[in-house]
Image (cartoon, grey):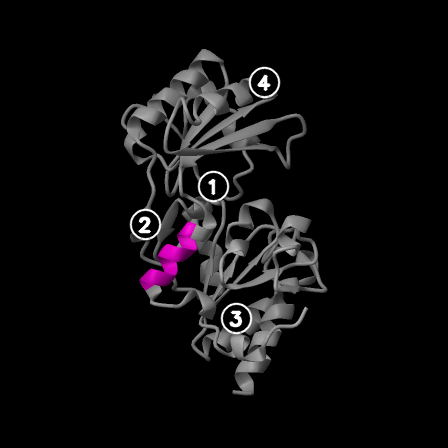
Amino acid sequence: MRIDENKLRSLRLVLFDLDGTLLNDNGEIGQESIRLVTELQKYGVQFSFASGRLHSALTQYADQLHIHTPIISLDGACIKSHPDGRAISTTFIPQEKVEKAVAYGDLYLMKYALCHADAIYFTEHNATIPDLMDKFGAKFIEVDSYDGLFDKTLEILFISDYKEKLRYVRKKMSFPYTWGLVTSYSKSVTNEGLYFLEIRKKGSNKASGLSKLIKYLRINIRETAVIGDWYNDISLFETDAIKVALDNAVMDIKDRADIITHKNNNQDGVAEFLDMVLKAKMRK
């Protein structure tokens, strides 16, 4: 697919998904992408991430790319500046709903944890959580109890090998039993036979995070490009940004893309798009 070069020339912000997009399967950023980010920064292009990871698991990559733009973490539930870590936007789950979810976790003997901006908290009963969660680079902290942690929870994470239990809790934490939450049910990528349930406040997704970020930066959505590969990127691909899918992206992402790279994340596919932008900027 081709896109109007004037749109590439007008870009002021590029937003990366991390896992499966900017990072290869070894968790590394391609050298050509690093070089091109540096070059484009000279033209005033800003860069940021929109990831399901915690903020603290993203900062090392921001440092590697010399990014000083606020970062969207936890799929839009948190936006914090970098490097000072100042909160731009946090979407906390109401305390009474966190308590309700925890009660279900205890009742059905499921493993669960409370996710805050920079750490995932778990109790001794949930001690296997750090080994089972697909939260790459997350900081885990064991606590004696969840008391005092309910009011700053951005995401509740459940894990079980019983799909029926998770589906039941998902139902009970959704409308009409509970209002104002969004749930996400998925299979573990790294642990076969395990299933996850993630609960956040309704309206928390990558697109809402992007909307808040560009308002903060005073950048128009049409001056923005988003790059992704997975289902949690779909909300970004329903915006008016330039939408870039890597070759390894799922079809639901490719179907919504303006550009599909010829290369995948292990071939530094992001650099393919960044090179297009740099060439457009140089011809300005």
Q: Is residue 82 visible?
A: no
Instruction: Kindly report the distance in space between the C-alpha atoms of the residues bearing marks 2 and 3.
Output: 26 Å
Residue numbers of the magenta segment: 208-216
User: Is residue 213 found inside the magenta-colored segment of the image?
Assistant: yes
The residue indicated by pointer 3 is 37
Instruction: Kindly report the distance in space between the C-alpha atoms of the residues bearing marks 2 and 1.
Output: 20 Å
Taking the image as shown, residue 75 lies to the left or right of residue 32, namely left
Residue 36: horizontal and vertical position, in percent?
56, 73
Sequence-first disc among 3 and 1: 3
Q: Secondary structure at mark 1?
A: loop
Which residue type carries mark 2? Ser
Are the residues tagged 2 and 1 within 8 Å (C-beta)?
A: no
Q: Secondary structure at mark 3?
A: helix
Q: At 48% from the left edge and 73% from the top edge, which residue is drawn?
A: 11
Q: Would you say the magenta stretch is mainly helix, strand or loop?
A: helix
Q: Disc number at residue 164?
A: 4
Instruction: Kindly report the distance in space between the C-alpha atoms of the residues bearing marks 4 and 3.
Output: 45 Å
Q: Secondary structure at mark 2?
A: strand
The residue indicated by pointer 1 is 138
Where's the N terminus, which quadrant?
A: bottom right
282 vs 113, nearest the viewer: 282
Q: Secondary structure at mark 4?
A: helix
The residue indicated by pointer 2 is 89
Q: In front: mark 2 or mark 1? A: 2
Q: Quadrant of residue 156?
A: top left
Which residue type carries mark 3? Val
Q: Tell me the crowding category of disc 2: few under 14, some 14 to 19, or many 20 or more residues within 10 angstroms, Cα based.
A: some
Are the residues tagged 4 and 3 within 8 Å (C-beta)?
A: no
Sequence-first disc among 2 and 1: 2
Q: At 46% from the left edge and 79% from the top edge, which residue is drawn?
A: 42
Q: In front: mark 4 or mark 1? A: 4
Hey, which residue is sitting farthest top in the picture?
107
